[in-house]
Protein backbone atom coordinates (compact mmCIF):
# COMPACT_ATOMS: atom_id res chain seq x y z
CA UNK A 1 0.00 0.00 0.00
CA UNK A 2 1.96 2.96 -1.28
CA UNK A 3 1.92 6.10 0.80
CA UNK A 4 1.70 9.64 -0.43
CA UNK A 5 4.08 10.13 -3.33
CA UNK A 6 5.77 13.38 -4.20
CA UNK A 7 8.08 14.16 -7.06
CA UNK A 8 10.55 15.38 -7.66
CA UNK A 9 12.20 15.00 -4.26
CA UNK A 10 14.67 17.76 -5.07
CA UNK A 11 14.17 20.58 -7.55
CA UNK A 12 16.60 23.32 -8.49
CA UNK A 13 15.40 26.34 -10.40
CA UNK A 14 16.91 29.68 -11.37
CA UNK A 15 15.11 32.88 -10.53
CA UNK A 16 12.28 33.54 -12.95
CA UNK A 17 11.71 29.90 -13.91
CA UNK A 18 8.63 27.86 -13.12
CA UNK A 19 8.47 25.05 -10.57
CA UNK A 20 5.94 22.22 -10.74
CA UNK A 21 5.55 19.95 -7.75
CA UNK A 22 3.48 16.78 -7.97
CA UNK A 23 1.61 14.85 -5.31
CA UNK A 24 -0.18 11.53 -5.65
CA UNK A 25 -2.40 10.85 -2.64
CA UNK A 26 -2.77 7.50 -0.97
CA UNK A 27 -5.14 5.07 -2.62
CA UNK A 28 -8.69 5.84 -1.63
CA UNK A 29 -7.92 9.38 -0.52
CA UNK A 30 -9.72 12.25 -2.19
CA UNK A 31 -8.49 15.16 -0.08
CA UNK A 32 -5.10 16.79 -0.60
CA UNK A 33 -3.31 19.44 1.43
CA UNK A 34 -0.13 21.35 0.67
CA UNK A 35 2.17 22.75 3.34
CA UNK A 36 5.40 24.73 3.07
CA UNK A 37 8.32 24.58 5.47
CA UNK A 38 10.77 27.45 5.36
CA UNK A 39 14.22 26.92 6.91
CA UNK A 40 14.11 26.72 10.71
CA UNK A 41 10.31 27.00 10.76
CA UNK A 42 7.37 24.66 11.14
CA UNK A 43 5.13 23.55 8.31
CA UNK A 44 2.57 26.14 7.24
CA UNK A 45 -0.71 25.35 5.55
CA UNK A 46 -1.07 26.54 1.98
CA UNK A 47 -4.07 24.99 0.28
CA UNK A 48 -6.69 22.25 0.60
CA UNK A 49 -8.15 20.58 -2.47
CA UNK A 50 -10.60 17.89 -3.39
CA UNK A 51 -10.91 16.46 -6.87
CA UNK A 52 -11.43 19.39 -9.27
CA UNK A 53 -12.13 21.80 -6.40
CA UNK A 54 -10.10 24.20 -4.31
CA UNK A 55 -11.67 24.19 -0.86
CA UNK A 56 -9.37 26.56 1.02
CA UNK A 57 -6.43 28.48 -0.42
CA UNK A 58 -6.08 30.93 2.44
CA UNK A 59 -2.41 30.04 2.96
CA UNK A 60 -1.34 30.54 -0.63
CA UNK A 61 0.62 33.65 -1.60
CA UNK A 62 -1.61 35.88 -3.69
CA UNK A 63 0.64 35.89 -6.72
CA UNK A 64 2.65 33.31 -8.66
CA UNK A 65 1.31 30.28 -6.75
CA UNK A 66 -1.49 28.01 -7.93
CA UNK A 67 -2.68 24.51 -7.19
CA UNK A 68 -4.93 21.99 -8.84
CA UNK A 69 -6.18 18.47 -8.28
CA UNK A 70 -7.66 17.24 -11.56
CA UNK A 71 -10.11 14.42 -11.96
CA UNK A 72 -7.30 12.22 -13.25
CA UNK A 73 -3.68 12.41 -12.20
CA UNK A 74 -1.75 13.95 -9.34
CA UNK A 75 -2.24 17.24 -7.57
CA UNK A 76 0.08 19.95 -8.88
CA UNK A 77 1.51 22.91 -7.00
CA UNK A 78 2.81 25.43 -9.50
CA UNK A 79 5.09 28.35 -8.72
CA UNK A 80 5.67 30.81 -11.52
CA UNK A 81 8.69 33.11 -11.77
CA UNK A 82 10.35 31.69 -8.69
CA UNK A 83 12.36 33.90 -6.35
CA UNK A 84 14.96 32.96 -3.77
CA UNK A 85 12.40 33.30 -0.99
CA UNK A 86 10.47 30.37 -2.48
CA UNK A 87 13.28 28.01 -1.47
CA UNK A 88 11.68 25.64 1.00
CA UNK A 89 10.41 22.12 1.54
CA UNK A 90 6.91 21.58 0.19
CA UNK A 91 4.89 18.78 1.75
CA UNK A 92 1.73 17.21 0.49
CA UNK A 93 -0.71 15.32 2.70
CA UNK A 94 -3.85 13.37 1.93
CA UNK A 95 -6.84 12.14 3.89
CA UNK A 96 -9.66 9.80 3.18
CA UNK A 97 -12.96 11.57 2.91
CA UNK A 98 -13.51 14.04 5.66
CA UNK A 99 -12.84 17.71 6.24
CA UNK A 100 -12.37 17.05 9.90
CA UNK A 101 -9.00 16.94 11.52
CA UNK A 102 -10.08 13.74 13.23
CA UNK A 103 -9.36 12.18 9.85
CA UNK A 104 -5.60 11.61 9.82
CA UNK A 105 -3.52 13.43 7.27
CA UNK A 106 -0.79 11.25 5.77
CA UNK A 107 2.26 13.13 4.56
CA UNK A 108 4.57 12.58 1.64
CA UNK A 109 8.37 12.90 1.85
CA UNK A 110 8.34 16.44 0.52
CA UNK A 111 9.96 18.28 -2.37
CA UNK A 112 12.98 20.41 -1.54
CA UNK A 113 12.97 23.43 -3.84
CA UNK A 114 16.16 25.43 -4.20
CA UNK A 115 16.10 28.67 -6.16
CA UNK A 116 19.48 29.89 -7.35
CA UNK B 1 -5.94 31.93 15.92
CA UNK B 2 -3.77 29.13 17.21
CA UNK B 3 0.00 28.89 17.55
CA UNK B 4 2.44 26.24 18.72
CA UNK B 5 5.76 26.64 20.48
CA UNK B 6 8.44 23.99 20.67
CA UNK B 7 11.11 25.65 22.76
CA UNK B 8 13.82 23.03 22.24
CA UNK B 9 15.26 22.97 18.76
CA UNK B 10 17.47 19.99 19.61
CA UNK B 11 17.44 17.46 22.44
CA UNK B 12 20.46 15.18 22.82
CA UNK B 13 19.96 12.10 24.98
CA UNK B 14 21.73 8.82 25.62
CA UNK B 15 20.23 5.53 24.52
CA UNK B 16 17.84 3.96 27.07
CA UNK B 17 17.41 7.28 28.89
CA UNK B 18 13.96 8.89 29.23
CA UNK B 19 13.07 11.90 27.15
CA UNK B 20 10.46 14.65 27.15
CA UNK B 21 9.86 16.93 24.18
CA UNK B 22 7.96 20.07 25.12
CA UNK B 23 5.05 21.58 23.28
CA UNK B 24 2.95 24.56 24.31
CA UNK B 25 0.08 26.02 22.35
CA UNK B 26 -2.07 29.09 22.46
CA UNK B 27 -5.65 29.17 21.35
CA UNK B 28 -8.87 30.95 22.18
CA UNK B 29 -10.87 27.83 21.37
CA UNK B 30 -10.64 24.15 22.13
CA UNK B 31 -8.16 22.28 20.00
CA UNK B 32 -7.10 18.93 18.73
CA UNK B 33 -3.42 18.13 19.33
CA UNK B 34 -0.96 16.00 17.38
CA UNK B 35 2.60 14.79 17.40
CA UNK B 36 4.28 13.85 14.13
CA UNK B 37 7.73 12.33 13.58
CA UNK B 38 9.90 12.80 10.51
CA UNK B 39 12.73 10.37 9.90
CA UNK B 40 15.49 11.48 7.50
CA UNK B 41 14.31 11.73 3.91
CA UNK B 42 10.80 10.58 4.79
CA UNK B 43 7.40 12.18 5.20
CA UNK B 44 5.79 13.07 8.49
CA UNK B 45 4.24 10.14 10.33
CA UNK B 46 1.54 10.53 12.97
CA UNK B 47 2.75 9.40 16.40
CA UNK B 48 -0.40 10.17 18.37
CA UNK B 49 -3.29 12.58 18.63
CA UNK B 50 -5.58 13.98 21.31
CA UNK B 51 -9.16 14.60 20.29
CA UNK B 52 -11.09 14.20 23.55
CA UNK B 53 -11.38 11.94 26.58
CA UNK B 54 -8.40 10.76 28.58
CA UNK B 55 -5.66 13.35 28.77
CA UNK B 56 -2.95 10.70 28.55
CA UNK B 57 -2.58 9.55 24.99
CA UNK B 58 -0.52 6.56 23.95
CA UNK B 59 0.99 6.39 20.50
CA UNK B 60 3.22 4.22 18.38
CA UNK B 61 6.79 3.22 19.19
CA UNK B 62 6.28 3.56 22.96
CA UNK B 63 5.59 7.30 22.92
CA UNK B 64 2.89 8.98 24.98
CA UNK B 65 1.75 12.55 25.55
CA UNK B 66 -0.32 14.28 28.17
CA UNK B 67 -2.75 17.06 27.46
CA UNK B 68 -2.70 19.72 30.17
CA UNK B 69 -5.39 22.27 29.51
CA UNK B 70 -4.47 24.61 32.37
CA UNK B 71 -0.87 24.82 31.19
CA UNK B 72 -1.80 24.62 27.49
CA UNK B 73 0.81 21.94 27.01
CA UNK B 74 1.05 18.63 25.20
CA UNK B 75 4.49 17.26 26.04
CA UNK B 76 5.74 14.07 24.41
CA UNK B 77 7.50 11.44 26.51
CA UNK B 78 9.21 8.12 26.16
CA UNK B 79 10.65 6.22 29.15
CA UNK B 80 13.57 4.66 27.26
CA UNK B 81 14.75 5.83 23.86
CA UNK B 82 16.50 3.87 21.12
CA UNK B 83 19.00 4.98 18.52
CA UNK B 84 16.24 4.53 15.96
CA UNK B 85 14.21 7.29 17.63
CA UNK B 86 16.62 9.87 16.23
CA UNK B 87 14.36 12.10 14.13
CA UNK B 88 12.58 15.43 13.95
CA UNK B 89 9.41 15.70 16.04
CA UNK B 90 6.63 18.15 15.28
CA UNK B 91 3.77 19.19 17.52
CA UNK B 92 0.63 20.46 15.80
CA UNK B 93 -2.81 21.79 16.69
CA UNK B 94 -6.04 22.40 14.89
CA UNK B 95 -9.27 24.05 15.94
CA UNK B 96 -12.51 22.14 16.42
CA UNK B 97 -14.63 24.41 14.29
CA UNK B 98 -14.45 25.24 10.61
CA UNK B 99 -11.08 24.74 9.02
CA UNK B 100 -10.26 22.05 11.54
CA UNK B 101 -8.30 20.31 8.77
CA UNK B 102 -5.75 23.14 8.91
CA UNK B 103 -2.85 21.84 11.00
CA UNK B 104 -0.66 24.45 12.68
CA UNK B 105 2.82 23.17 13.38
CA UNK B 106 5.59 24.07 15.77
CA UNK B 107 9.11 24.56 14.44
CA UNK B 108 10.15 21.04 15.41
CA UNK B 109 12.53 19.41 17.87
CA UNK B 110 15.40 17.29 16.67
CA UNK B 111 15.89 14.30 18.96
CA UNK B 112 19.43 13.00 18.82
CA UNK B 113 19.95 9.67 20.56
CA UNK B 114 23.55 8.79 21.32
CA UNK B 115 24.93 5.33 22.14
Image (spheres, helix red, strand yellow):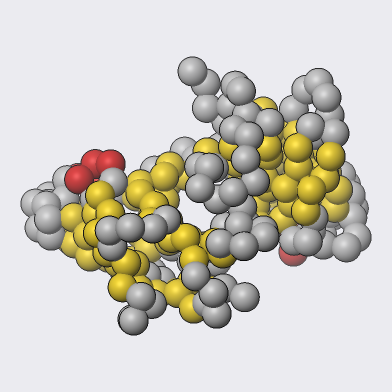
Give the x, y percent position of residue B111.
30, 57
Vertical placement of B97 versus A1: above or below?
A: below
| Residue B7 visible | no
Give the x, y percent position of residue B70.
34, 81
Q: Give left or right: position of A45 versus A84.
A: left
Location of residue A30 (image quadrant) = top right
Q: Total marks drawn?
A: 0
| Residue A55 visible | yes
Location of residue A36 (image quadrant) = bottom right
Depth check, front residue: A75 or A86: A75
Residue at 85 percent across and 34 percent down: it is: A52
Q: Give left or right: position of B94 versus A46.
A: left
Depth check, front residue: B87 or B23: B23
Give the x, y percent position of residue A77.
78, 42
Vertical placement of B79 versus B60: above or below?
A: below
Residue at 79 percent across and 48 percent down: it is: A55
Taking the view exactly as shown, the residue that stands out farthest to the top is A1
**Quadrant of the image for the C terminus of chain A?**
bottom right
Give the x, y percent position of residue A93.
60, 41
Residue at 50 percent across and 47 percent down: it is: A102
Vertical placement of B83 versus B98: above or below?
A: above
Q: Give left or right: position of B105 versus B70.
A: right
Taking the view exactly as shown, the residue that stands out farthest to the left is B16
Residue at 52 percent across and 27 percent down: it is: A3
Amino acid sequence: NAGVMQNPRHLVRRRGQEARLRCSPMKGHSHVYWYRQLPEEGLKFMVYLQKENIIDESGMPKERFSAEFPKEGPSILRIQQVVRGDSAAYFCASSRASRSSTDTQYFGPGTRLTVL
Amino acid sequence: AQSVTQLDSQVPVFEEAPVELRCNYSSSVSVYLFWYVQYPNQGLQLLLKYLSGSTLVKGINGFEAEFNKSQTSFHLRKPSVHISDTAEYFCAVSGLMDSSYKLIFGSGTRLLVRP
